[in-house]
Structures are given as C-alpha cells and as structure tokens.
Image (spheres, rainbow, N blue to C red):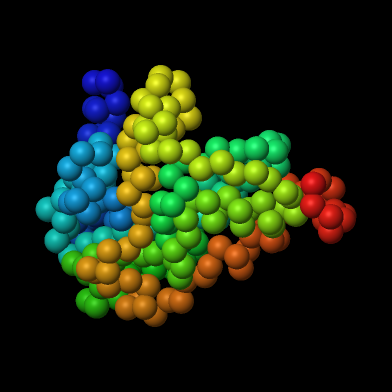
Amino acid sequence: GAFDGNLRRLMGEAPGWMAEAAARAGAQAFVHVSAIAAEPEHATEIEYAAAKKLGEERVLAAFPKATILRPSILFGEDDNFINMFAGLISTLPVLLVFGPDAKLQLVYVDDVAEAAVRALEDPGKHGGKIYELGGPEELSMMEINEAIAAAQKRKRTFLPMPDGLSATFAALPGTPMGSDQWKLLKQGNVASGAFPGFDRLGIEPKPLDLFLDRWMVRYRKHGRFHAESAV
C-alpha cells in the first residue's frame, strides 16, 4: 500500500541524509551497506531493490567518494535467516521449499563487517567504488535446507514448490513471504561479477558449513548430548 511505498522510499532516502551529515562533518571516508539486489535489472520491478538503488544514488550524490558494499544474504549465529529455517526443520517432519533451485551466495556477517573496516581504513584505495560481496559458494534453497537438517541430525522430507503456487502464496495477505520477497528469491542472489569482491579487499570469505554444525547443536533433539541416529 501507500504506507509500504513511503516506508521503502524513506529507507532509500535515509542513507543520503547520513552521507550528507558525514560530508558536513568533514569525514574522510563513508561506507554504505546496500545489497546485490540494487543492481538495475533487479531494481526496476521490486520495491525493496528500488529502495536499495535509491539509497546508493543518494549516498553518492552527497559523498561521491563513498564506498558501496553490496552483500548477498547475510548469515550469522543469531540471524533471522538460517534460524528461521532451523526452527521449522526442528519442528516439522515435512517442509515446503519455495524457489528450491534459486541460488544464494550466503555471506558471513563478520566478513562484511571486516570489508567495511578495510574500506574505511583506506578511502584512497576503496573510496568511490562498488564491491559485490558474496560467499565462497552458491547454494540452492533446497541445498541450504538439506544442510541445516543434516547439521541437526534430522531426517526431513522437503517438497519443492512450483513457481506458480509460490507466487500465489506470496500474493495472499498475512503470509510470511510477500510478493517482493518471492521475486527476489526466485531470481537468486549471487554476485554478478561486474564489480570487485572480497579478494580486492584482501578478505577470504568463510563458508556456511564452517559454522553450521556448531550452530545447530541447540536445535538437535537432545542438544550436544544428541545420539548419532537421525530423528
């Protein structure tokens, strides 16, 4: 509705206000964390992506030497992405998977934070540039769900949802996934390769499987005392 549209526009304008304040204060460096979705091919029809693109434009207008970081979907120990699926998988024996073949280049939140620090430390090298930050592997939504279940030592049945049914579900009011989210998921979220990435910042991004087994202990049937048989 109009409220949602105004809110998204505010999300796009707010980074520009911060960049203006930084410029007035004489800051030598400014980092704006955007998203891979800000690419023009994504931003034309999806309000979230359009807001991200607007944010970048406003930042660069106010602070031309700002560094723009475009990460893929972030993951971390207490995030709302991995833990949302982990909670469902720990509870339900059968789960629907929306966009099962959609590829995501999940990126560890600490790696993005380190990228921001390095950009701020050397604005002469990184200022005025756009970096796409994706993790070291591309995983499908089905693979992510299967990896979470395996880390929980649970046997689960995953049913791939056809795109038509997924789009209909997303269009219904009150569902946990809106139309914008479905459109973003369906097209995937991986670096385009048109911009430099972690390597140009001297960072080796960490994969999800480096952390998943430890993070999923709390979701196992008996926590760290869980027996090896899957449930």
Which x, y percent locates residue 82?
Answer: 56, 49
Q: Residue at x 46, y 76 (%)?
A: 204
Which x, y percent locates residue 79?
Answer: 55, 48
Q: Is residue 62 visible?
A: no
Q: Is residue 144 visible?
A: yes
Quadrant of image for the N terminus: top left
Identify whether 51 is placed above or below 130: above
Q: How many marks?
A: 0
Q: Residue at x 35, y 60 (%)?
A: 190
The residue nearer to you, when weighing 211 against 137, is 137
Which x, y percent locates residue 194?
Answer: 22, 68
Classify residue 16 as left or right of residue 147: left
Which x, y percent locates residue 24?
Answer: 18, 53
Classify residue 30 as left or right of residue 169: left
The residue lying furthest to the left in this view is 61
Q: Quadrant of residue 33?
A: bottom left
Q: Residue at x 19, y 51 (%)?
A: 41
The residue nearer to you, when weighing 54 against 84, is 84
Q: Residue at x 27, y 72 (%)?
A: 196
Q: Quadrant of residue 36?
A: bottom left
